[in-house]
Amino acid sequence: MLAFDYGERYTGIAVGDTAVRVAHPLATVDARASKARLAAIAEFVATWRPAHFVVGRPVSVEGEPHDLTHRTERFARGLQGRFGVPVTLIDERFSSAEAEERLRAIGRGGRKHKQFAHPVAAQVMLQDYFDRHAAP
């Protein structure tokens, strides 16, 4: 499985195996344009050949959708359409905060290591997916 922490510029990617059910941070795609983002993601799809995607769906603290929610949903539809891989949207509230906390705990916090937060946030979401859903 591949998981995505979608952002307007940076999209974090994590990978996980459904057999062992452990997620790992993989990479950050730096692209503002949808075509460039999907082209970069295509390389990860070709390498990892995932059977499923997980995409973090951003909402407010109260659970209400906002502008980025709609763009993320469009991104998820684009992934499914381009790669023919099923997509599950999951609540990503607090995943970025948890990612930053994990990075600080290993001495990689702050602005200097900000680029690591995106794939770690994707890892947090994918691990949450594994922990909440029964094994296939």
Image (cartoon, rainbow, N blue to C red):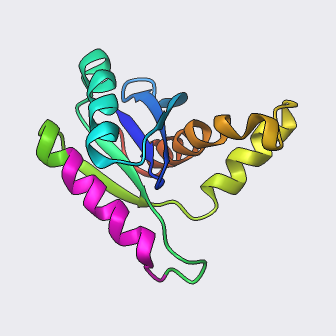
In the image, is 120 to the left or to the right of 34? right
The location of residue 27, given as percent across then percent down, is: 51, 28
> Where the C terminus falls, by quadrant?
top left
Residue at x-position 34% and y-position 29%: 40
Q: Quadrant of the N terminus?
A: top left
Identify the main secondary structure in magenta: helix
Looking at the rendered structure, the number of numbered marks drawn on it comes to 0
Identify which residue is drawn at 49% across, 73% down: 59
Horizontal and vertical percent for residue 41?
A: 32, 32
Q: Is residue 25 left or right of residue 47?
A: right
- Which residue: 77% across, 37% down? 103
Task: Check residue 69 for magenta coloring.
Answer: yes
Side of 120 relative to 43 (left or right)? right
With respect to residue 38, does 59 lie above or below? below
Magenta span includes 109: no
> Where in the figure is residue 80, as x and y percent of width and height?
18, 47
Q: In the figure, is residue 46 to the left or right of 89?
A: left
Range of magenta residues: 64-79
Q: Residue furthest top?
A: 47
Q: Is residue 31 above or below residue 106?
A: below
The image quarter in which residue 44 lies:
top left
